[in-house]
Image: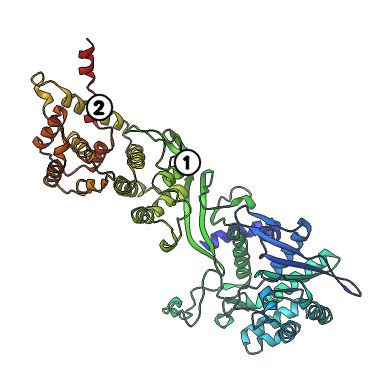
Amino acid sequence: MLKDCLEIFEPILKQEGDKLIIDYHIPSDGTYIIVDICEDEMKMREPFDINFDKKTGKILGSNERDYNKARMYDYYSKLIEMNKPIDLKKTIHSNNYLSFSLKKESIRNKKLNNEIIDNFYDILKEPMTKYQSKMKSREIYKKLEGEIGKVDGALLERIRSWIKDNIFKIDIGEKSKDYLKIFFRFEDENKTIELYKKESDRYLIPNIYNKNDYNEIIDDKVFGFPSDNMGLNAKKPYLDNKTRKINIPYLIDSDEALLQKKFFDYLSGYATRQQYNIYINTDKEKKITRDNIKAMKNGELLEEDDFKGIYLRIQKGTSLEIIDCDIISTYKFDLKKAFDYKAYIDIDLELSQGKNVEFYSKYYNKHDIQELLNEVYFSKFLKGNYFNDAKNIKLNDDVKKRNLLMCRNSIFNWLYKGYFNDIEAVLNRSSLELIKNSVVNESNVLAIHQFNLRWSFIEYFKGEEKMADFLNNIKANLKAKINYKEGKNQNLDKIENDMEYYFAVGQTAYYLLSLSKSSNKNQSLINPFLNAKNDYVVKDNLRKLYKKYNYAISINNKFKKLYSMVLGYKPKDKVDQDMLLAGFLSNNLLYEKNENKEKEGEA
């Protein structure tokens, strides 16, 4: 799949050159100094700071002209990784003599000294000494030096002298732990850029592979194992392919290795900006441009229809990593049909946090569905935690956290990749547990929102459009039965089916629990009903509640009718937790006034 990505990236790179990568490169926070190389002297410009604000995505503290120069110089001067330094003490982090980069702490704590500076420039002046004991690396460098020439020793010595004379005089502050970076340039910017590129290649080409000991020469061409996204050393023998004569996982030539390295540099710029979701359009019928690659932050979705291509999830630690990849056959931002969030159980349109939002409406795209799931089910912990380790998710509710971990992959595949194979089953299973948890530990308000969302999804996926009418009919029938006058209609003294029965159980349980005179009415008493496996347990729990609270039951003909109907009905199937919850969460019919009785009184 990486080769497929490179097939799109390569023509874009050929069109724009390294500017494509440099435009997205963000230098490390710190103080930057540009020194002009003049014929007779070195002139230091005014230092400036670069600070990247991750929240706003803006660069603070620098003017655009100096920032653009520093960004270019910094890109060509950075190390591939800290395990491949020029300075063996790892104090100086530059790869060429035109730049000098280090942590300010190294100056403050006197880790940097003239010996380290001299060793750094000595190696750069005679790079072959670095590879003296490494035969394959030495051969690569020797060939490279024949192509680009030797180091300009006179210029290097001028820069060495300036650094030793000035580095300890620069004001670095007393506490900052960021970088100090110094870049040397000519008045001719084109000459400067060409020299930076050449000296960058002098470092890069011999170090492009994971380890040159793994290299193989095939038809006079070097093939090696790249460092990107995978390490290989004596501590990781499990990565070796033991069944092959050459046990290295895969080998690529130097051209492809360089292209792959630049691709990872390009992605690294996105990762620094916290744009971790990468979409690569692989449609080759149209001209391939920079727009073929798009990057999104956590929570942002690709607002395209009929997208086909590759999805990458990246993260940045010590280096850029691709932690997830997939081929997307068809992705649509808009839903195939509108999602209708209905109020099956009536409630004021506000969440338990008191935020007034009109949730109940139609939704037409995946962004709005994500907002709905994030808010109603997962207390705003979904969007930023699709890929975080469980230990790093600061969600104190264990039930929500468990269901978030169980659901997030399926939700992500649906909303971000267009796969919905298991989303229905996953949401169906988790939503029920989340509703139960809200009933017991949070509030009925949130539980009702979650119940309504659950049934809206059931209707959306199954295509059933009469669930609201169905529930209203059950409520109306049960209301008629508990308000009827005895002897008038024999059909109104019994429950007709299982769904009506479990709705009635929920109504009865809520009424009995509401009779508690405790100032803290603990709804955990509903747990035995929610966890009941059969009707015997359901009825036994109702009897226990009745015995506990019957002291508070006045002569209530409606309760007597409801309770007797419940005790007199034997369900045919397993416990219907949906209808039991619907009965528990709906407005309790026993507290509603008898409209017929009121009308008779008025007459």
Tell me residue 263's x, y (percent): 61, 63
What's the amino acid at mark 1? Answer: Asp
On the rendered structure, is 522 left or right of 233? left
The residue at 32%/41% (across/down) is 444
User: What amino acid is at disc 2?
Assistant: Glu
Crowd tier of the residue under label 2, counting other residues whose Cα lies within 10 Å: few below 14, some 14–19, many 20 or above? few
**Tag 2 residue:** 592
| Residue 182 placement: quadrant | bottom right
* Coloration mode: rainbow
Relative height, residue 460 to residue 83 (above, below): above
> For this view, does 587 lie left or right of residue 547?
right
Graded by Cα atoms within 10 Å as few (under 14), some (14 to 19) or many (20 or more), the crowding at tag 1 reads some
Q: Position of residue 505 (x, y in %)?
A: 18, 38
**Along the line of sight, the residue nearer the viewer: 304 or 387:** 387
Location of the C terminus by quadrant is: top left
Measured from the top left, where is residue 176 in percent x and y?
A: 66, 69
> Is residue 526 or residue 383 the one in the foreground?
526
- Residue farthest along the right direction in this orientation: 40
Task: Estimate the spatial distance between the alpha carbons at disc 1 and disc 2, rounded to whole Å.
Answer: 36 Å
As drawn, the residue found furthest toward the bottom would be 133
**Comes first in the chain, label 1 or label 2:** 1
Identify whether 113 is placed above or below 560. below
Residue 481 visible here: yes
**Measuring 19% from the left and 33% from the top, which residue is drawn there?**
500
- Disc 1 target residue: 368
Give the answer, above or below, for where 117 lies relative to 60: below
Residue 561 vs residue 250, the one in the foreground: 561
